[in-house]
Amino acid sequence: NAGVTQTPKFQVLKTGQSMTLQCAQDMNHNSMYWYRQDPGMGLRLIYYSASEGTTDKGEVPNGYNVSRLNKREFSLRLESAAPSQTSVYFCASSVAGGANTEAFFGQGTRLTVV
Amino acid sequence: GENVEQHPSTLSVQEGDSAVIKCTYSDSASNYFPWYKQELGKRPQLIIDIRSNVGEKKDQRIAVTLNKTAKHFSLHITETQPEDSAVYFCAAIHNTGGFKTIFGAGTRLFVKA
């Protein structure tokens, strides 16, 4: 049982390049999330998908797009990377929302934009 | 908008002492309050949570208290050990189907042997 798996673990991009971060969960969870983690700022929600077929903006959605490909997979796309997007990105999943929102995190992707 | 403030940002204690981390939240409709621990270079993991219908919950050396009137909740770690050294995040979640988990900025706890 792998839990939440993210790829890649590390990535360096040049300004203006695009890339997609992949995330998959095998826990049959309904909800999935993308967070970014910056020093001193905790975990900030970029986008979430409450259930298969739906996506919604979180706190910091600008510069990102997401796709809930199926119940297992939720990808995050940077269309034109900027240095301000240098961060550690975490994908997470949960059974549902509200009080069932215990989040299970992936191992993270360290992204550097130069 | 919704906000969760967490204090202190850094906490250093001697092994065996207690550590307390405090959080306040702004959304009075929040009713689920989890705490996550993130060891260096690893993913955050849930260590304890509390729902709004209780005021305190304990799990071995870890306890969480909630004051809904004042909109604050705290994490208490007793008899701290070096392996408790990590970053701790509090979070507040809106009731009935809320998905926008708002995290605090984190507390880096150092336990000195």
Image (cartoon, rainbow, N blue to C red):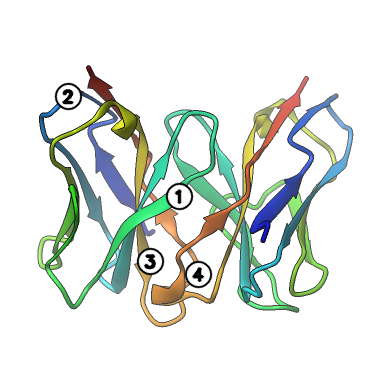
Residue B19, quarter of the rendered image: top left
Q: Amino acid at mark 3?
A: Ile
Marks 1 and 2, how far apart at CA? 22 Å
In this view, B16 is above or below B88: above
Which residue is disc 4 drawn over? B99
Marks 4 and 3, how far apart at CA? 7 Å
Which residue is disc 2 drawn over? B15
Which residue is disc 3 drawn over? B93
Q: Earlier in the sequence, mark 1 or mark 2?
A: 2
Q: Earlier in the sequence, mark 1 or mark 4?
A: 1
Q: Nearer the viewer, residue B14 or A108?
A: B14
Percent from the top left, x then y, of residue A100? 44, 74
Which residue is disc 1 drawn over? B45
User: Of the residues tagged 1 and 4, which is closer to the observer?
Assistant: 1
Q: Which chain is disc 3 placed on?
A: B
Q: Earlier in the sequence, mark 2 or mark 4?
A: 2
Marks 3 and 1, how far apart at CA? 16 Å
